[in-house]
Image (cartoon, rainbow, N blue to C red):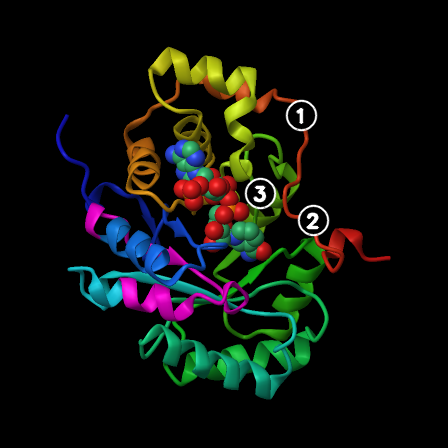
Amino acid sequence: MTELTSNDVPRVDGMPQFGLGTWKNEDPDACANAVATALEMGYRHIDTAQAYENEEHVGRGIAEADVERDDVFLATKVFIDSLTHDDVIASTEESLEKLGVDYVDLLYVHWPARTYDPVETLPAFEELKDDGKIERIGVSNFQRRHLERAREVLDEPIFANQVEMHPFLQQRELRAVADEMDVELVAYSPLARGAVFDDPVLSDIAEKHDVSEAQVSLAWLREKGVTAIPKATSESHIRDNWESLTLGLDAEDVRRIDAIERVDRRVDTDFAPWNAR
Ligand code: NAP
């Protein structure tokens, strides 16, 4: 097999449709090493957030890797306690400082919750874009009504909506909304935080192709045109996920995964909009 390179990753409007997640990768060295290992393997999309409290370590990993910063697609997220206009600006400047970069490629509203107010929050994102501090505006955990309201307020396009997606949370409605609104869908927890390893359908397909269940889930997401950002710490997990790029599922595999009825939402905070009363 010829070695996979960063050029093998499909891109949409400059965003590599496969990346590395970093939630819960809080140990400074483990986090920096995972980021540097992934970049040297060929990953070019790194996902972090203010709330992960690891932006410094992610920044160190980027600096340590033998890859130019401009070749990395770097995304972070503003947390729900910093979504007033002034806090968006100040906290993003702090993020840039911690990450050791002049701009991020994508800045997300992490959740439409607590201090989120479209008319306060979103113009601050536009200002950051005008100032060259962010290249694209993203949202996360948004439902149709939040996307519609954000589009009324924003002059700039919404580039992506990052939501939980995997074979046990297939997000048919949000995928249709994203298509309709021309917004990219980025799948978080694409391995269902480990639950993909105990599903008979995924295990059967994995065995058939002699790959891991992680690769099956990631290849299925790719098949749906969705960007996946699996989090992995060890080099072997980072590589296993990377090699999903060579796995082609056949129509029968995809049909079987589409038909999985198990529903398992892995990230379910009390401030999530689906829990709002
Ligand atoms: P995930 O990527 O579905 O699963 C991560 C877990 O799977 C970790 O325990 C990891 O272990 C393990 N793993 C990874 N690759 C593996 C492999 N090939 N074989 C066996 N185990 C493997 O879960 P996630 O971290 O929740 O989601 C991914 C990223 O999405 C996050 O890191 C974060 O960047 C983002 N996210 C965003 C939001 C949001 O609200 N926007 C919410 C959740 C997550 P090791 O670490 O030990 O390798």
The answer to whether mark 2 and mark 3 are in CB contact below 8 A is no
Sequence-earlier tag: 3 or 1? 3
Query: Element under label 3?
Result: helix
Q: Nearer the viewer, mark 3 or mark 1?
A: 1
Is residue 125 placed above or below 47 in the rendered structure? below
Q: Nearer the viewer, mark 2 or mark 1?
A: 2
Sequence-earlier tag: 2 or 3? 3
Query: Element under label 1?
Result: loop
Q: Quadrant of residue 44?
A: bottom left
Q: Quadrant of residue 199?
A: top right
The numbered disc on residue 175 is 3
Residue sitting at 36 percent across and 73 percent down?
99
Location of mark 1 (residue): 262
Residue 101 belongs to the span the image colors magenta: no
Q: Amino acid at mark 3?
A: Arg
Q: Amino acid at mark 2?
A: Asp
Rendered location of residue 157, percent (x, y):
50, 66
Tag 1: Cα neighbours inside 10 Å, few (<14), some, or many (≥20)? few
Q: State the residue in front, 190 or 8.
A: 190
Query: Element under label 2?
Result: loop
Residue sitting at 36 percent across and 49 percent down?
19
Is residue 63 placed above or below 188 in the rendered structure? below
Rendered location of residue 175, percent (x, y):
57, 42
In the image, 192: left or right of 233?
A: right
Tag 2: Cα neighbours inside 10 Å, few (<14), some, or many (≥20)? few
The numbered disc on residue 50 is none
Q: Amino acid at mark 1?
A: Arg
Location of mark 2 (residue): 268
Span of residues in magenta: 40-61
Residue sitting at 87 percent across and 57 percent down?
277
Sequence-earlier tag: 2 or 1? 1
